[in-house]
Image (spheres, grey):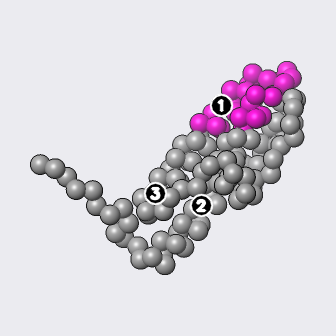
Amino acid sequence: MATKTKNRNEIFDDKTTKQIASELQPVLSDLIALGLIVKQAHWNVTGSSFRAVHLQLDEIWATVQTNVDEVAERLSTLAVSPAGQANEVAASSKVDQIPAGFMDASKVVDFMTERVGQ
């Protein structure tokens, strides 16, 4: 027996859907930007604590990616197309960038603590 896919958003009216989407989309943009910042730090961390910080950044990145997927799928479930392309994220994210180049592990920890707290 064939199954028919139901309309993705049968719970909320249009006004509520738009309100929820307007709250979720900025979260998605910030999470994607945070993931990119974490990877930038991961690739550029140096110093005596390199290994510990490098491994911790891998864990943070995995957590961020899980949350990116969760938020994007919630938008999709509402029948709202998630905006996650680089230009869309760059235009809308409020997460502060980190300096380019190599950074000592202690500085990376400071930068990540600031960004995760945003």
Residue wearing tag 1: 58
Write the start and end of the magenta stretch as one range. Answer: 38-62
Residue wearing tag 2: 25
Residue sitting nearer the eye, 22 or 66: 22
Q: Image check: 67 left or right of 98?
A: left
Percent of width and height locating residue 8 = 36, 61
Residue sitting nearer the eye, 26 or 89: 89
- Residue 100: assigned label: none
Q: Quadrant of residue 6?
A: bottom left
Quadrant containing the C terminus is bottom right
Q: What amino acid is labelled 1 in the image?
A: Asp
Residue 85 to residue 25: above or below: above
Query: Mark 1 packing: few (<14 Cα in 10 Å), some, or many (20+)?
Result: some
Total numbered labels: 3
Under circle 1, the secondary element is helix
The residue shown at (77%, 42%) is 112
Residue wearing tag 3: 76
Q: Separation of disc 3 and disc 1 at Cα?
A: 27 Å
Q: What amino acid is labelled 3 in the image?
A: Ser
The verdict on residue 61 being magenta is yes
Percent of width and height locating residue 7 = 32, 63
The disc, 2 or 1, on the residue closer to the chain's N-terminal end is 2
The disc, 3 or 1, on the residue closer to the chain's N-terminal end is 1
The disc, 3 or 2, on the residue closer to the chain's N-terminal end is 2
Magenta residues, dominant SS class:
helix
